[in-house]
Image (cartoon, rainbow, N blue to C red):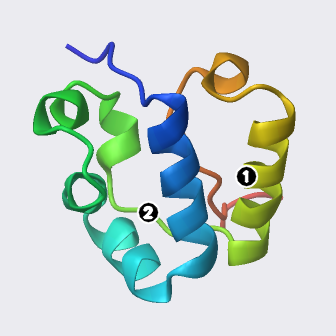
Amino acid sequence: MSDASLTNDQAQKLLRELSSNSGFRQRFQEKPAAALVELGIPHETVVNLNAACLAPMRLASPEVFQAALKSFAAEGGAQATLTMITPHLRLDAK
C-alpha cells in the first residue's frame, strides 16, 4: 500500500536537512527509508510511501532544497505538494 504522505512538519524537517546537512543528504541518497526513520518519521508511514520515494537517488543541490523549503512555507505546506517526491538531478535529460 502506498498511500502515506508526510505531515507539513515532517516535510519541512526533511527539506531543511536536505538543504543543510551533508551527512544526512548522503544517507538519504543511499537509503531514503532509513534516513526518514532517522528523522523520526514513523516506520509505518515510511513503508507506506510510494516506492519511487524510497529508491536510492542522486539529489539536486542543497540550494534547490533551500528554494523548495521557502516555496513550501509560502504555499501552505503539504497541501500544495501532497507527495514526497524529492527534487533530483536527471542525468538522461536532453
**Three-letter amino acid code of the residue under disc 1:** Leu
- Residue 47 higher or lower than 33, as above or below: above
The quadrant holding residue 90 is bottom right
Q: Position of residue 25 (x, y in %)?
A: 45, 75
Q: Residues within 10 Å of mark 1 (few under 14, many from 20)?
A: many
The quadrant holding residue 60 is bottom right
Q: Residue furthest bottom?
A: 23
Q: Position of residue 18 (x, y in %)?
A: 55, 68
- Give the CA separation, mark 2 to mark 1: 19 Å
Q: Are marks 2 and 1 in contact (CB under 8 Å)?
A: no
Q: Position of residue 51 (x, y in %)?
A: 30, 34
- Residue 87 higher or lower than 76, as above or below: below
**Three-letter amino acid code of the residue under disc 2:** Met
Left or right of 10? Residue 90 is right
- Precedes in sequence: disc 2 or disc 1: 2
Q: Give the residue number, with chain letter if any, for mark 2.
A: 57
Q: Is residue 27 visible?
A: yes
Q: Position of residue 11 (x, y in %)?
A: 52, 42
